[in-house]
Amino acid sequence: MAENERKVTPISEIGEFGLIERLTNKIKLKNDSSLVGIGDDAAVLDYKDKKIVVTTDLLTEGIHFNLMYVPLKHLGYKSVVVNLSDVVAMNATPKQVTVSLAISSKFSVEAMEELYDGIQLACEHYNVDLIGGDTTSSLTGLVISITALGEANEEDIVYRKGAQKNDLVCITGDLGGAYMGLQLLERENEVYKVSKKVQPQLEGYNYILGRQLKPEARIDMLKIFKDLDIKPNAMMDISDGLSSEIMHICKNSKVGAKIYEEKIILDKETSAMGEELNINPLVAALNGGEDYELLFTLPIANHDKIRNHPDITVIGHIVDASEGTTLVTTGGSEIELTAQ
Ligand code: ADP
Ligand code: MG
């Protein structure tokens, strides 16, 4: 459908309650722990003998997302996923989310429905219930705040503070792709601003664009850890780049780490984009962020269990705090890591 045929209903036409109704009327609860969802003053949950983990993120237009090149449906999906990733990083299973919005008058009812299509797609994909939220107006731009709740047995929860000397440092997946995807989108947006007739050159870069626009939380790792009968000593998700995350784990655990450059996995599109834009893909992996992979440490006795696992890569090991947190380059030199 062309832009000018699309129906545009001002939110003022149906009001706040009308909008909440339009956005949430199809929602059905899936989890036993969700007793009561949207519609009363508060949701009611029953976690029985489980522990509950809670996490919140706040996203503001122009700071965390740019609607020039991020479709609202993708934005909705990603906003949920980044919270679920934090739950998973505690080794907990996500169960519920709340979604709060501040909406400026430039957004129509249909635009907010697109956002909610993405939110609900993520809820379906991750088997999570949308149990409430709040809706208000803003003077400029869109603000999205999402809270996610998850459950875990107390003994299964993994913190940042548990890393032990000699632990293996591991990551899932490859790094730097989301950052390179963002650089590509920003370049094409700049070109578009200069000449609206030029079609964006995005071919051949589906993987890194997907890493930026439609990231996934590594919920599959919860089962992989169980099946392998391993529990990380420390874990967090990689939202701000490997460098800053490993430093968080080291600081919280009062240890140091050695990471090996040659072990860090980069996708071929990440490397190709790096070459095209003259950005070192290693820098994207270390300082880029938004990959939403997991960084964790494991007792070295687990090495045989993970040695050939396709989802887990050992990138280094934990050392004494006095040795610092360093990157050993392919050339053999050692450099102190810093957070960007
Ligand atoms: P209150 O006046 O108590 O803030 P609201 O009228 O804002 O109540 O909300 C009514 C119901 O709709 C509540 O259950 C609330 O959790 C839910 N709700 C409000 N906004 C949203 C939203 N953006 N997404 C999901 N649920 C929402
Ligand atoms: Mg309200």
Image (cartoon, rainbow, N blue to C red):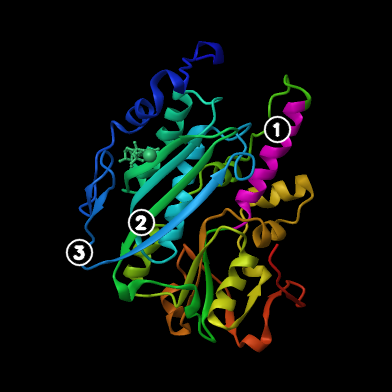
Mark 3 vs mark 1: give the one in front.
3
**Left or right: where does residue 228 sit relative to residue 245?**
left
When the figure is inspected, residue 39 is found, relative to residue 127, above or below; the finding is above
Q: Name the residue that disc number 3 marks.
A: 48
Magenta segment includes 189: yes
Give the residue drawn at x 38%, y 27%: 19
Residue flagged by tag 2: what amino acid is it?
Answer: Leu
Figure quadrant of the C terminus: bottom right
Q: Does the magenta stretch include residue 73?
A: no
| Residue for point 58% across, 40% down | 206
For badge 1, the amino acid type reads Asn
* Drawn side of residue 222 relative to residue 300, left or right: left
Placement of 192 over or under 277, stated as above or below: above
Identify the magenta region.
175-193
Q: Name the residue under label 2.
A: 149
Residue 151 x, y percent position in the rendering: 31, 62
Residue 200 in the image, given as x and y percentages of width and height: 68, 29
| Disc 2 secondary structure class | strand
Residue tagged 1: 189
- Callout 3–callout 1 Cβ contact below 8 Å: no
Image coordinates of residue 198 in percent, x first then y, are 73, 23
Give amino acid for label 3.
Answer: Lys
- The answer to whether residue 307 is visible is no
**Residue 106 figure quarter:** top right
Q: Please tell me in which quarter of the rendered image ligand 2 is found.
A: top left
Tell me which label, 2 or 3, sits earlier in the chain.
Answer: 3
Measure the C-alpha gap from mark 2 to mark 3: 14 Å
Which element type, helix, strand or loop, lies under badge 1? helix
